[in-house]
Amino acid sequence: MAYETISVAPIAGALGAEVSGVDLARKLPDATIAEIRQALLTHLVIFFRDQHLTPEQHLALGRRFGPLQVHDFVEAMPDYPEILEVRKEPEETRNFGGGWHTDVSYLERPSLGSLLYALEAPEYGGDTLFANQYLAYETLSDGMKQMLDGLTAMHSARRPYRTFTLRFRDMTEAESAPLLNYLCDHAVRPEFTCRFRWQPGSLAFWDNRAVQHNAINDYHGRRRLMHRVTIEGERPV
């Protein structure tokens, strides 16, 4: 589509686009917010470079797209309960958000999406992968689609740092595992993905309803610091 207030350039065949021509620290006109929202719906994850946001500006930007969530088991920044600090110090080996997942899918109102802003990034490493779940579904066989149409997946925070999908309704976890394992592997095939390289001042905005993401943990000995604001979504039907 044609955009009048922003420029949008796709970065991969499956999903993802870089948005330019906008200063996210400013109070943006409604028309610009509408075009950013449309770019998100079209490309599922959008990226901005060379931004300079205070915590207050980050929060104000997020609220233009809906009410913000407070995470239920990850501690927020002091004085900013709606901002998560995503930090990995040089001496740490575990990162935040590693492994393919969507955020808080177990909530009655899972998140619409998040705006993740990089304050510090290693000179290389620490990229994030995103996977288009529309493509993952569309490329399943007709027989698999028919079988899945009759199933309901049960989500839980019991395993907070793994996938939240435990089993199918009326089935045990052991019975569900073979099908879930196949679907999880299929959903992140390389041709469904894009990869984003972070720089200080970069911001990613992804549609949590339609993509999975994976923070690659390949920068041991170097520091990475980000702030994340998450927008509340609607109750799934």
Image (cartoon, rainbow, N blue to C red):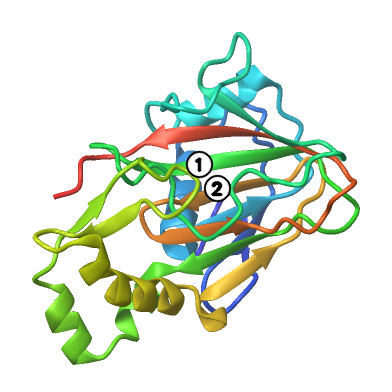
- Of all residues, the one furthest to the top in this rendering is 79
Left or right: 203 in relation to 115:
right
Helix, strand or loop at mark 1? strand
Left or right: 192 in relation to 210:
right
Vertical placement of residue 25 versus 149, above or below = above
Vertical placement of residue 112 versus 8, above or below = above
How many residues crowd around disc 1 within 10 Å: few (fewer than 14), some, or many (20 or more)?
A: many
Q: What residue type is labelled 2?
A: Phe
Name the spot of residue 152 as percent of width and height, x first: 15, 60
Q: Please tell me the numbered disc located at residue 25.
A: none
- The quarter of the displayed image where residue 23 is located: top right
At a point 34% along the width and 86% down the height, the residue shown is 139
At a point 61% along the width and 70% down the height, the residue shown is 194
Q: Mark 2 highlights which residue?
A: 205
- Of all residues, the one furthest to the front in this rendering is 174
The CA span between labels 1 and 2 is 6 Å
Q: Are marks 1 and 2 in contact (CB under 8 Å)?
A: yes
Q: Mark 1 highlights which residue?
A: 114
Vertical placement of residue 118 versus 71, above or below = below
Helix, strand or loop at mark 2? strand
At a point 8% along the width and 71% down the height, the residue shown is 150
Number of marks in the rendered image:
2
